Image (spheres, rainbow, N blue to C red):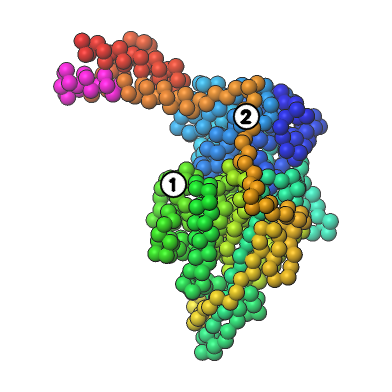
Amino acid sequence: MIDLDDARLRPGQAEALRRWREALAGGSRAELVVVPVGYGKTVIGVGSFLVAASAAGADSCLYLTPTDVLRTQVYDGIERALGLLGARFDARKYLAENATLHRAAANRANVIVATYQQVAAAPERYARLCAKRRVHLVCDEAHHLGERGQWAGALRQLPVATSLLLSATPVRLDREPLAGARYLPSEDGEGLVIDPLIHVTMRQAWREGRILKRLAMQMKDYAVELRTPEGETYTFTASEMAELPDFDQRCVRQQLRWNDDYVQPLVREFALTLERKRALAPGQHQGLVFAATTTHADHLARVFAKHHPGLRCAVVHSGEDLPAAEAERRMRDFHAGRYDVLIQVRKASEGFDAPTVSVLLKLDAVFSREPVIQQLGRGLRFNHSLPEAQNVLHVFIGRDPRLAPIIDHLEREAAIPAIPRPVDRGAPQPDQDVPGEPAEEEAGSDEPRALPEVVDVEEAGDAVLDETGRLIEGQQLAMFGVPAPPPPPAARTAAPVAAPANDPRATVVDLQAELQEAIEYCKTWTARAARERARRFGQRENHFAVLNAAFARETGQRGTLATPADYRRKGDWMKRKYLELLG
C-alpha cells in the first residue's frame, strides 16, 4: 500500500513507518513516536494506519486529538498526507460528532477524526464502533494521556487492534507516565525513561531544514526597586532575581506582570515587530501572547487596545465569563486570519498549529524547560508561504534567572528526562487538561503574611539572541547544536515553496462535506414545502410534521437518516411535494 522508498517523506517520517512495520511484524501492537513540532505528525499518523492495514489487517482508523482546532487541521490534512505517502488507498473520512456517530458506520467511513473529550463523553458509542471493525487508533499529542486520567481510562475501553501514540514532548508536567507508552529503568535505577519507537530530535529537524523557523529572542532586563514589609528598600535587576528569597521572587514576578513600566516596553517591541512583519507580508504574520491568569489576559487586551489599536486582538481562556463555545470560535477566527493577536491562558501552549505565528510575547511564568520549549514550538513551525529569509520567530520575554536552562537546552538539547517510579496509582484523575505551564494565582491571594512591594521599575537593557544564532552578550549560540545558515543577500529572496501535489493514486471522500450538502438540500426543500402548505391550509397544523409523516408513509423510510443518499431522497420528495402544492 505504501512504498516507503518511493514516498516523498522526510527521513524521520520514513524511518518511523519502517520501524512501525517491523514492530507489528514482531508482535507489538502499540508504540510511541516522538517528533518535533512541524515535522508532520499527521503524515506519520495516516501512514501508520496504512501500514497497520497491510501488516495487521486494520480496516478503519480512529484518529484522536486534544482540541477541536487540531481535529479540523488533521481532517483537512488527510488528503495531503496520502499524497506525500504515495498511497494507493481510498479514504472515506468523517469528522465525528457524538450525536451522529451512527453516520460513520452508515457511510462506510474508514478514517474517523475525533477528540479525546468526545471519546471520554461517550466511550460506549466508540467502543461499539470499534467492536465491529479492526480499528487502528492514532493518539495525537499523546502526552495528554496520563495513566490515571479519564481520557486514558476511556481509551482503554476501546477494543482496538493497534495503536500509535504521537508526541513532540513525551514528558508531562506532573511527571506521570504516559498511558500505553513503554518505559525502561534509568541508568541510575532511580526512575523510568520512556522508550519510544523512534525519537526525531529538534537537532535533526534543524539539520534537515525548512521545518522550523529561526529564532530571535529579546530578553528585556529591568531595574526593580523593592520595599520589604519592614520598610527597607533596595534595587536589583530582573536577571539577578535568583538572589532573592523564594517567596519574594514569587511576589516580584506576580507584581511585575501587572506593572505598566514592565509590561508596556515588552508589548511595544512585540507590536512594532508584528506590524513591521505584517507590512512586509500581509496575511502571513500573527502574534501569540502567553498570559498568567484570565484577569491578566483581559488586562493585556486593554493594554493593546489603548496603545496598539491597529492590532485586532482576541482573548481565550477557560474562565467562567468566557463560554467554551465562544473561546473555540475565537480560536477558529484567529486561524482564519480575522485576528492579528491571540492573548491566551493555557489554550495555545501545545497542540496549536499556526505557521503564521511569528511573534511571541511570554508574560506568564517560567517554571521549567519542557513547557517553555512547547510554547516556543507554537511559533517555530516553518511557514512555506514565505521565503526562508522571512521565516524567523521573534520572542519577547523579561529577563529571569530561570531562562538559563532554556538557553542551555537550545544549545545542546538534553535527553528526555526520567520520571519517578510510580508507587501508588491512586484514584483516577478528574481531568486531562495538561497545561504548558501551571497558571499562577494573583499575588497575595492565599498568603496571610505581609508582602514585599515593587515600588519602581525601569528598563535596564536588552539581551538579544538574533536569528543568526548570536546571543549579544558574548555567548555564541547554535540552535540545538546546529549553526545558523549565513543570511541571504538582501536582493535574493527565495520564492515560496508550494506543498506537494496530491497523489492521483489516492482518493479521499469527504463524508462530512457530502453529508452537510445533502442535509442542507433536504432542509431547504422541506422548509419550502412546509411554507407553501401553510400558505394554502393555514397555520392550524404542524406542516413539518404532516410532511414528514407523509414521506415516511409513502416511501417506507422511517427512523433517523444517515447517508447523503437518504437526505437527497427526502429532499427530492419534498421538492416534488412543493411543486404539487404550487399547482
The foreground one among 3 and 101 is: 3
Which residue appears at 72% of the width and 26% of the height?
A: 2
* In the image: residue 523, left or right of residue 540: right
Q: Is residue 93 above or below residue 427?
A: above
> What residue is shown at x 67% (from left), y 31% (from top)?
84
Q: How far apart in space, not on screen, are marks 1 and 2 (Cα)?
A: 28 Å
Residue that carries the numbered disc 1 in the rendered image: 338
Query: In the rendered image of this protein, does residue 228 appear above or below residue 501?
Result: below
Callout 2 secondary element: loop
Q: Secondary structure at mark 1?
A: loop
Image coordinates for residue 388, horizontal then vertical, percent? 65, 47
Can residue 354 be seen here? The reply is: yes
Q: Which residues are magenta?
A: 526-541
- Which residue in the structure is indicated by mark 2? 501
Q: Does the magenta stretch mainly form a helix, a strand or a loop?
A: helix
In the rendering, at what x and y percent does residue 575 appear? 31, 15
